[in-house]
Image: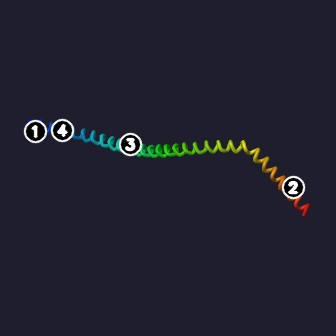
Amino acid sequence: MVFRTIKLTVYQCDLFQIQDLSKQLGVLKTQFEASTAEQQDLKRKADLMEKRLDAASRLIEGLASEHQRWSKEVEELCISREKLLGDCLISSAFLRYAKFAKFTDKTFS
């Protein structure tokens, strides 16, 4: 009878330990699932950031070539601006001549 009581007590202790371990296992599973979900979320965000970084790098490279083109165009516009006054004077002189030539052609016809 004493042996049965000791055996029963040992079994109850084992049962309590198993229940305690089951509770701990449940808590650990919940933590694992939460950590796994967080890891997947962080991985998704990291992939998104990597795509954005790649797009930004390509944009910067594209803008660098545009900067070179725009710089060249600014230089050309500065040169054209320097010649603008002379071009206007030549154009106005031609128009004045053309008007005078038409007037004399009509008068002498």
Q: Residue at x 21, y 38 (%)?
A: 17
Element under label 3?
A: helix
Which three-letter amino acid code belongs to the residue tagged 4?
A: Asp
Q: Nearer the viewer, mark 1 or mark 4?
A: 4
Q: Is residue 18 left or right of residue 28?
A: left
Residue underneath mark 2: 100
Which three-letter amino acid code belongs to the residue tagged 3?
A: Glu
**Mark 1 neighbour class, 10 Å CA radius: few under 14, some 14 to 19, many 20 or more:** few
Element under label 4?
A: helix
Residue underneath mark 1: 4
Q: Furthest residue to the right?
A: 107
Residue underneath mark 3: 38
Which three-letter amino acid code belongs to the residue tagged 1?
A: Arg
Does label 3 or label 2 sit earlier along the sequence?
3
Which three-letter amino acid code belongs to the residue tagged 2?
A: Phe
Q: Residue at x 83, y 56 (%)?
A: 98
Q: Nearer the viewer, mark 3 or mark 4?
A: 3
